[in-house]
Amino acid sequence: MISDNLVSIRREIGEASRRFSRCSGDVQLLAVSKTRPIVDILTAVEYGQYRFGESYLQESIEKIRALEAYSLEWHFIGSLQSNKTRLIARHFDWVQSLDRLRYAEHLSRQRPASLSPLNVCIQVNISEEPQKAGVCLNELPSLVNEVLELPRLRLRGLMTLPARCSDFVDQCRAFHKLYLVYKELQDSGIVLDTLSMGMTNDMVAAIAEGATLVRVGTGIFGKRLSN
Ligand SMILES: *Cc1c(COP(=O)(O)O)cnc(C)c1O
């Protein structure tokens, strides 16, 4: 089942890319494996998936350690806390949920010298929901500049998780807003290559609006197990 799902998600990414004139290979797939057992991840690996996203620190460290031999790429996409940054800096390749200078400083300081700089995306609260993680647009430029100064972080781009909605046009509107901000940063001379937006239910809209990385969980692994 996971293998069939992977095939159809890849096909959908390909179709959406053609339909919205994206170059082939422009949109990468992050398999969101939070709450999933290691066997499920291994099935996805067998079918060519090597990029995985995790949200819950404890279970993710167990998975990363158990799967070390496969040289997978691990993205932390969950909420950050001061007491989590050390393990994240040691075990992950990417952090997509960076939204505070304090955590950025911790991650940079705690990134082991033996590893390459930690790739980061700044999470933007594009729908400006009060409870949601992510910086608001007016706070973004200063955080971008501060992160660029940190020696052990490599700023790759922006990530968002917009307010849930099922209407395609509304989905596009939110993603387009982030695309414009991303473009503006690039035009100001900052080198960025990652616009992480779109999940199982709004992946096509995200691809239409310029996503370079979609984060798909249920579409690959089925209904989420409780955590
Ligand atoms: C869980 C999660 C996803 C995957 O969502 P699905 O709807 O299962 O595809 C993507 N991004 C983030 C940040 C998540 O927490």
Image (cartoon, rainbow, N blue to C red):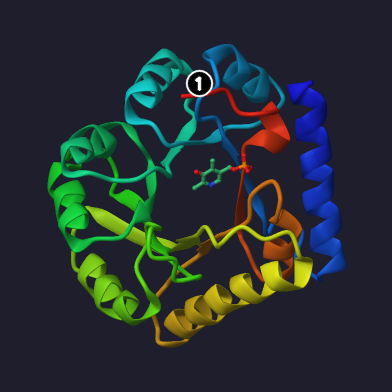
Q: Quadrant of residue 203?
A: bottom right
Quick one: 52 or 131, which is closer to the camera? Answer: 131
Q: Is 199 situated left or right of 185 in this image?
A: right
- Picture coordinates of residue 182, whole percent (x, y): 49, 76
Q: Which quarter of the rendering shows the N terminus?
A: top right
Q: Is 15 situated left or right of 224 in this image?
A: right
Q: Is 68 situated left or right of 12 in this image?
A: left
Quick one: 142 or 171, which is closer to the camera? Answer: 171
- Picture coordinates of residue 30, whole percent (x, y): 58, 42
For the residue carrying disc 1, how many other residues have a C-alpha within 10 Å: few (<14), some (14-19), or many (20+)?
few
Q: Quadrant of residue 151?
A: bottom left
**In the rendered image of this protein, does residue 1 appear above or below residue 81?**
above
**In the rendered image of this protein, does residue 190 appear above or below residue 198?**
below
Dot 1 falls on a residue whose secondary structure is helix
Which residue: 67% across, 63% down? 206
Residue type highlighted by circle 1: Tyr
Q: Which residue is mark 1?
A: 70
Which residue: 33% across, 30% down? 57
Quick one: 189 or 214, which is closer to the camera? Answer: 214
- Picture coordinates of residue 16, whole percent (x, y): 82, 59
Q: Quadrant of ligand 1?
A: top right
- Picture coordinates of residue 140, whole percent (x, y): 33, 75
Quick one: 185 or 203, which is closer to the camera? Answer: 203
